[in-house]
Image (spheres, rainbow, N blue to C red):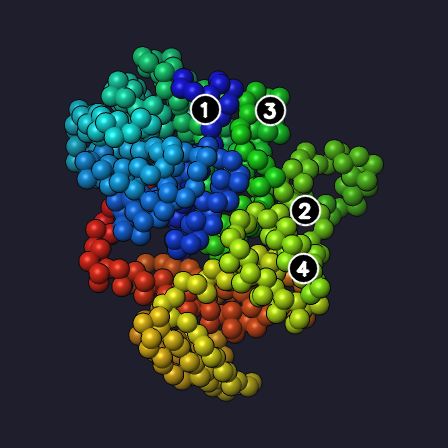
Amino acid sequence: MNAVSDDRVLIFDTTLRDGEQAPGCSMTLNEKLRVAAALRNLKVDVIEAGFPAASPGDFESVRTIAQTIDDVIICGLARCNAKDIKRAWEALKAADRPRIHVFVATSQIHREHKLQMAKEEIIRTAIEGIQLARELCDDVEFSPEDASRTELEYLGEVVEAAIQAGATTVNIPDTVGYTVPGEFFDLFTYLRNNVPGIDRIRLSVHCHDDLGMAVANSLAAVQAGARQVECTINGIGERAGNCSLEEVVMALKTRENYFGVQTGVETKQLYPASRIVSNVTGMHPPRNKAIVGENAFAHEAGIHQHGMLQHRATYEIMRPEDVGLSRSSLILGKHSGRHAFRQRVEQLGFRIDDVELNRCFEEFKALADRKKNMYDRDIEAIIMNVDAGNTGPWIIDELHITAGTGGIAAAALKLRHTDGRELRQAGEGDGPVAAAFRALEQATGIGLDLKNFEVHGVTVGNDAMGEVTVTVEYNGQSFRGHAVSTDIVESAAFAYLEVINRIARREDSEKAGDTDAAAAGTT
Ligand code: KIV
Ligand code: ZN
């Protein structure tokens, strides 16, 4: 097996590729860079940064991540065709350690209904794709998509052909979350016992959570010899999501006595990375989510609390500090200085340059004047908001609301476009939020179908900040926007504007001729 020792499991993060495919989880370039920096702090081994042929936006983000994030393998996905592979290489070639990941579906149902290709044709396609990728890059991963529903012997033949063609990692995906741990263990054992050359490559596992078994299935594969696990922060991903990175990493660490393997992950960065991804996507893990949920380390029952006071290990198998959860969250006030602010920002897992730090510090001071207590969540919100405000092209200069009980509310809006246009627009609705949304739609000409509206208190108290997440549909596609302010109507307007800006940017780039976008569609 290449490079690292046999008891080391590589962590391959696909938050920016498979995770980003989850409805409403698409990220801007700035947001992707923020997540990529968090993944590097976390010391994952591989970052799958995107699918360069899928859209100009994806290409650009993979290229920027490849140029700016070092000390980690940067991977890009490609179908097994020359156009995708060359495009992936174009995006990746500036990386210190690039990897091309090629895939083709192998199961009967995909062969017959999606690809209309015979078994031999699939093998030929895989070989040609891998060989071309190897001409460009030394590190090539191959995935037989829907492997868990592929006939076992045929899967063995595909994997053997992939190894001979030069794949350095072979990944076995449970694309539709169909398998169960015992069966997956047997599948990996079969491959290890029957495929010539399998010891020369790294075997990898990639699970989806449709039956809630992605982590269990990944662990079963590790027991059977997989030495790379593909996963996402907070388990985000299409449908029920992917294998959750924090869960699989903490299972391997907490039960090292059982699994006998290690990862290189800096587990203290797990909670900060989770917060960054949930802030960026607006998708918050449930309170009872393992490792990073609000309640993951909370002990309510008296008998548990009593036991904990006697000895923490009575009811605690992991320490909150090991996953980066700090016990005291009340911090900094309006007299705190820039140095203390920077320290706290870094403890929260953010790496920001001086210009951005200054902007955030100004925001922090302004908010600290209005709010008595400042919490970690307030600081996170400031950093994420400063990001959102940067994205344009539309910027809200003024928003005035008139509302009372039981009547029509009115919004008056002043908007500015980065091309210099300035617009004033009034809107009405049966509440202040609806009025603000109407005014934004009329001013920008982008009409959205609101599907979901959520408000979270970021912290506690009368002066707490409120975070609004909106999920909308536009032309059949789902988008999510979120924003934070001490005024909930303002948060709602900024969240709505975030989506409008995303759509406006996409339409602008399509008008500029980048139409390669659409139809690449992966799993
Ligand atoms: O789920 C899947 O099969 C994938 C592959 C492209 C690895 O995401
Ligand atoms: Zn997948």
Taking depth in this image into account, of 273 and 176 the one nearest to the observer is 273
Q: Residue 337, labelled with which disc?
A: 4
Disc 4 from disc 2: Cα separation: 21 Å
For badge 4, the amino acid type reads Gly
Badge 3 residue CB within 8 Å of ligand 2: no
Disc 1 from disc 4: Cα separation: 46 Å
Query: Is the residue under label 2 in contact with that under label 1 (CB below 8 Å)?
Result: no
Mark nearer the N terminus (4 vs 2):
2
Q: Looking at the picture, how far across and down is residue 255, in whole percent?
A: 61, 26
Provide the secondary structure element on which disc 3 rests: helix
Which class describes the residues within 10 Å of circle 1: few (<14), some (14-19), or many (20+)? Answer: many
Disc 1 from disc 2: Cα separation: 31 Å
Q: Residue 326, labelled with which disc?
A: 2
- Residue for badge 1: 227
Left or right, 286 with reference to 317: left
401 to 523, vertically: above or below: below
Q: Image point 53% across, 63% down: which residue?
A: 359
Query: Is the residue under label 3 in contact with that under label 1 (CB below 8 Å)?
Result: no
Mark nearer the N terminus (1 vs 2):
1
